[in-house]
Image (cartoon, rainbow, N blue to C red):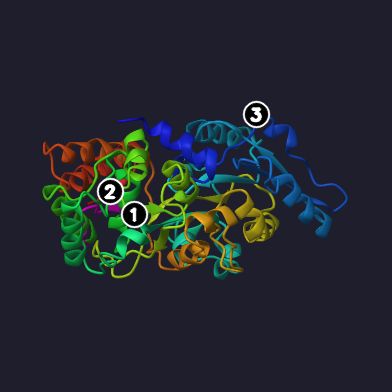
Amino acid sequence: MVSRNKRIVAAFAAVAAMGMGLAGCGSDTAGDTKTTDDGGVVNITYMHRLPDSEGMTLVNDIVAKWNKQHPDIQVKATKFDGKASDMIKKLETDVKSGEAPDLAQVGYAELPEVFTKGLLQDVTQYAEQYKNDFASGPYSLVQVGGKAYGLPQDTGPLVYFYNKAEFEKLEIPQTADEFIAAAKTAAAAGKYIMSYQPDEAGNMISGLAGASGGWYKVKGDSWVVNTETDGSKATADFYQQLLDAKAATTNPRWDPSFDASIKDGSLIGTVAAAWEAPLFMTSSGGTGSGEWQVAQLGDWFGNAGKTGPDGGSAVAVLKNSKHPKEAMEFLDWFNTQVPDLVSQGLVPAATTEDAETPSEWSTFFGGQDIMKEFKTANNNMGDFTYMPGFSAVAAKMNETAAKATDGSGKVADIFSDAQTTSVDTLKNFGLSVSE
């Protein structure tokens, strides 16, 4: 099984907004770009990790539009190319020295950890006026304990990719029982309508299970942990039945064997995050171009029409920003520049306008407006929040998930191990836990 790093590298190259690899970070020159106000002008600094590649609307060009329209609030953007772990270390150092930026892009899974380290500023009073510009699910991911620390930028709602030509023989099942029956029928013919991806358990399976109810809450001064919810049990049962019947592929997502299963036509359906669209096209090598489609998840995981998150990022206001009001004003504007963000490969969290599906995506997905499907998924996202140190939980989930592929473990073990690891990790942070 390939390392978690391959997932980060692969997604960053194509969409720049994937899971934990996309937490934004500061620049080595953050202290030099932080300016003082002069002549009534408010100066804001914004650190990002967007790709800024050829053919995209560059972040500096987007910011230039803001600066031209808002002479009293001037923004300077800087790009950081380091790892997510480097981001947290640098922000800690820069906040202590007073040299941190006003705004920094932070992955949803990292935001609670950055919060716990005391690096963020409560901007709930400003965020409230902008919350309706974003889907409620992504907006919940910038909150800890009901307080907001920034605004969502892009998302990774889970959806279903399927080969329409192959499914004309099956029909898309709506219930778990219908799906399992259809999967068995397809498997008997050498086709698979679902993949079980052990290297994505911490991201995908947590999102599927969390669609029907969050795992982590803050009550008083304690974290309340429950990773073994009804949704988790439904998800475990669903996948266990498929594995027992050998009716799902078990290739790790970031292993060449997964790509091979698309290219040879055996994999004809899978749960995927929205940001996977261009990656999936690459994985396919063009096989089935024009035949694939995107659909919302059926009620297969006890999710009652909801979906969950897999990746995406927010932009947070750092603790020592002297101008949180102006920073949030810019941030709302920037995160609602939908066409510009799409050019960067993002699936925007904003609901202010519809994102247009890039032509090459439309060609592969049979002319379908898949961005419209992603918007629907955004609006159907359940409220799910992460805990500080979730990366440790995700790593343990991946490890346990791999054992279910050879029968040495059960899918349900993923969630019991997530419970134990969550509690231990929070305690290691010195935090109070109520189980």
Q: Which residue is mark 3?
A: 28
Observer-nearest of 253 and 17? 253
From the top left corner, tell me how far across and down residue 414 is, in percent: 21, 44
Which of the marked residues, 3 or 1, is nearer the chain's N terminus? Answer: 3
> Mark 2–mark 1 contact, CB under 8 Å?
yes
| 48 or 425, nearer to the observer | 48
Q: Which residue is mark 1?
A: 271
Say which label, 2 or 1, has the lower sequence index. Answer: 2
Distance CA(mark 3)–CA(mark 2): 41 Å
- Neighbours of disc 2 within 10 Å: few (<14), some (14-19), many (20+): many
**Percent x, y for residue 394?**
32, 41
Q: CA distance from mark 2 to mark 1?
A: 7 Å
In-front residue for pair 47/224: 47
- In the displayed structure image, the side of residue 286 where residue 151 appears, left or right: right
Q: Which residue is mark 2?
A: 195
Residue 209 position, x and y percent, is: 27, 56
Query: Which amino acid type corresponds to the residue marked 2 in the rendered image?
Result: Ser
Question: Earlier along the polypeptide chain: callout 3 or callout 2?
Answer: 3
Q: Which residue is pictured at 36% across the width and 58% down the height?
A: 162
Instruction: Identify the residue shown where x is 52% and y is 46%.
Output: 17
